[in-house]
Image (cartoon, helix red, strand yellow):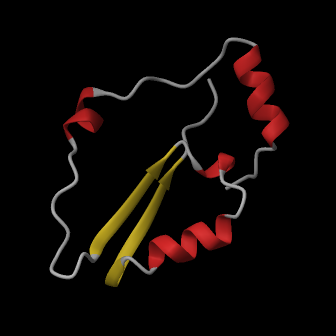
Amino acid sequence: MAYIAREQWEERYRGGKGFRRVGERERALRPGPAARGGVRDLVVVRLLYPFVRDRGRVLHGLGERLRDGGGQLFAQHGWE
């Protein structure tokens, strides 16, 4: 995954460009209740990663909330 500098994101939005809207299938996904003890099997983050300053801390913090064998998914759509 390539790193996109903050200036590139800002330039894109200033130019009036964005990303596709969330689709019906994505809208239908609803987080279920956490397992006993509040532990998750999967953490999904969409269109956020480039804006997080302290990525290591955030990834580690989310990872602590996962069950053993759980995973993290960071979805970052490509530019149009």
Q: Residue at x 22, y 44 (%)?
A: 29
Q: Residue at x 19, y 37 (%)?
A: 28
Q: Which percent across, then down, holds residue 70? A: 34, 77
Q: Which percent across, then down, holds residue 53? A: 72, 56
Tell me: residue 46, above or below residue 39.
above
Does residue 33 appear left or right of residue 73 in this picture?
A: left
Q: Which percent across, then down, holds residue 4? A: 76, 45
The quadrant where residue 15 appears: top right
Q: Residue at x 80, y 24 (%)?
A: 11
Please state the total of marks drawn on the protein image. Answer: 0
Q: Which percent across, then down, holds residue 66? A: 35, 78
Does residue 27 appear left or right of residue 16 in this picture?
A: left
Tell me: residue 58, above or below residue 36.
above
Tell me: residue 63, above or below residue 55.
below
Q: Specify the farthest residue to the bottom.
A: 68
- In the rendered image, the quadrant that contains the N terminus is bottom right
Q: Specify the farthest residue to the front.
A: 37
- In the rendered image, the quadrant that contains the C terminus is top right
Q: Looking at the image, which is closer to me, 52 or 41?
A: 52
The quadrant where residue 33 appears: bottom left
